[in-house]
């Protein structure tokens, strides 16, 4: 078959983590189904695991996958942050990636390469081959705005963000306290800060930037960033790109069956994403707070970590998560709540009519899933960009309630009980549920044929199709 008669082909490079792979895969499905593309997803061999293999194998046949060879990282400090490790791997993979893209270009009508937010250096491989290169942001316009302003913020003050007296002002968003800014940017002396500063400059070299968001959830920023501005690549909000519903399995079926027996909007879903974990003290406070609230709850319990952080960065202690709950908690709450170990089918849970609130870490994938199903949030951010997401969800979008921490960062049981009651029974909770339902309608509308995200993706697809493949 001549290349000109082949379907246009896109190569994606997600960085490690299902939270990066899933939105890219959902975008790939849209390109295949609506715009007649074929896709190759290129993965890092270091991120390979059984769950990822199963997920990739479940994608449509027009979406294939390839793996890069192992990238040596043994010279990095043992305490190097995950963003540093990902960025270094992306920079070092360029020779291998160039060969892989050249091979794809010889067998497909390759019209573009799209790299994940921490893989900007990998775009050098596409640039060397004169292939249009784009950046995919799996999080939001808030993150992108921060990164585009980072060089100027860096030059304006020698202080770390958490040392700033005044809040950080990002165009299109409420003021954000410096302490709540993206966690990897909180220490200028850390190598991770240098990498992100370099990424922020490289974003401007891209041929376009795709963002997993939709206009209605970040309206002012969407107006600003989708307007033409000299020196900045075009920005395409193409979300919400969230996980498709799948078979819940035996473990998930337990949660859904329990929800079937609960009244509408009566259950608080409690989960901290695929990587979130709490300390032992915080796990106990959460349990006793849920119990004291008297509200129905479905809690995805994980074994405590040594810090409130990302479980896959710090490691966990213990094997059975439920064994770390306070003595007698499961028996005392048996008629009101359900605690499940490690996992629940989150998309299906949030879409269940019994669920009326979501106690969440405010990761962007979870935020979009909550928004798409009209469920308001109790904000409990842990790491990464979650703290600044929480500020915007509480003060900007107004679909989230804040929790007040002690000076040592712990959320006490009385505060947890108070906010849970207000969310599930109070007038503020009812108002937030109405706002969340309106946001869900806007999320669905964005992906309709005439919706803002569909129009943005169509413009990009037409631009890609007009490229003469190498």
Image (tube, rainbow, N blue to C red):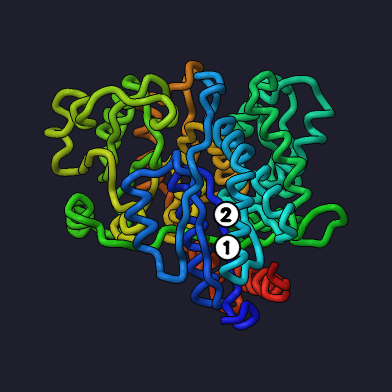
Q: Position of residue 97 (x, y in %)?
A: 59, 49
| Circle 1 residue | 104
Query: Which residue shows up at 51% across the image and 17% down it?
Result: 407
Q: Is residue 31 left or right of residue 358?
A: right
Q: Position of residue 39 (x, y in %)?
A: 52, 65
Q: Residue 100 — which label? A: 2
The quarter of the image holding the C terminus is bottom right
The quarter of the image holding the N terminus is bottom right
Q: Residue 211 — which label? A: none
Relative vertical location of residue 257 with respect to residue 166 in this rendering, above or below: below
Q: Where is residue 196 in the image (x, y as percent from the top left)?
A: 67, 34
- Confirm or deny contact between disc 2 and disc 1 (CB under 8 A): yes
Q: Where is residue 464 in the image (x, y as percent from the top left)?
A: 68, 70
Q: Circle 1 sits in a helix, a strand or a loop, which is it?
A: helix
Relative vertical location of residue 307 with respect to residue 371 in this rendering, above or below: above
Q: Circle 2 sits in a helix, a strand or a loop, which is it?
A: helix
Asked whether the viewer can see residue 422, the reply is no
Q: Is residue 33 left or right of residue 7?
A: left
Relative vertical location of residue 66 with respect to residue 426 in this rendering, above or below: below
Q: How crowded is mark 1: few (under 14 residues within 10 Å), some or many (20 or more)?
A: some
Residue 304, quarter of picture: top left
Residue 8, quarter of picture: bottom right
């Amino acid at each position: 078959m001549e290349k000109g008669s082949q379907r246009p082909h896109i190569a994606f490079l997600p960085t490690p983590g299902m939270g990066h792979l899933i939105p890219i895969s959902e975008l790939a499905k849209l390109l295949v189904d609506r715009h007649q593309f074929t896709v190759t997803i290129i993965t890092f061999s270091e991120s390979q695991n059984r769950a990822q293999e199963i997920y990739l194998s479940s994608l449509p046949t027009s979406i294939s996958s390839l793996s890069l060879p192992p990238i040596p990282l043994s010279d990095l400090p043992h305490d190097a942050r995950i963003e540093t490790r990902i960025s270094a791997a992306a920079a070092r993979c360029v020779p291998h990636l160039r060969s892989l893209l050249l091979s794809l270009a010889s067998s497909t009508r390759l019209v573009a390469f799209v790299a994940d937010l921490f893989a900007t250096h990998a775009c050098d491989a596409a640039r060397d081959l004169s292939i249009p290169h784009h950046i995919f942001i799996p999080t939001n316009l808030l993150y992108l705005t921060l990164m585009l302003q980072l060089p100027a913020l860096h030059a304006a003050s020698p202080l770390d963000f958490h040392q700033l007296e005044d809040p950080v002002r990002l165009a299109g968003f409420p003021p954000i306290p410096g302490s709540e800014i993206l966690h990897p940017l909180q220490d200028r002396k850390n190598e991770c800060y240098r990498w992100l500063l370099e990424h922020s400059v490289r974003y401007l070299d891209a041929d376009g930037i795709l963002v997993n968001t939709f206009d209605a959830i970040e309206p002012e920023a969407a107006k600003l960033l989708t307007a033409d501005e000299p020196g900045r690549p075009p920005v395409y909000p193409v979300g919400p790109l969230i996980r498709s519903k799948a078979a819940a399995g035996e473990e998930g079926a337990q949660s859904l069956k329990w929800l079937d027996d609960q009244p509408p909007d009566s259950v608080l879903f409690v989960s901290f994403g695929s990587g979130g974990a709490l300390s032992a003290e915080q796990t106990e406070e959460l349990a006793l707070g849920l119990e004291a609230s008297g509200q129905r709850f479905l809690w995805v319990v994980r074994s405590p970590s040594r810090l409130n952080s990302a479980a896959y960065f710090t490691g966990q202690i213990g094997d059975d998560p439920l064994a770390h709950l306070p003595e007698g908690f499961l028996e005392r709450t048996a008629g009101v709540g359900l605690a499940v170990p490690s996992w629940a089918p989150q998309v299906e849970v949030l879409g269940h009519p019994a669920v009326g609130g979501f106690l969440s870490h405010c990761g962007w994938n979870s935020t979009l899933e909550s928004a798409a199903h009209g469920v308001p949030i109790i904000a409990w951010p842990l790491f990464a960009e979650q703290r600044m997401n929480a500020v915007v969800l509480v003060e900007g979008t107004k679909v989230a309630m804040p929790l007040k921490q002690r000076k040592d960062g712990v959320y006490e049981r009385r505060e947890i009980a108070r906010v849970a009651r207000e969310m599930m029974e109070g007038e503020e909770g009812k108002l937030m549920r109405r706002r969340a339902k309106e946001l869900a309608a806007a999320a669905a509308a964005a992906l309709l044929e005439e919706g803002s995200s569909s129009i943005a993706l169509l413009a990009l697809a037409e631009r890609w199709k007009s490229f003469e493949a190498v």
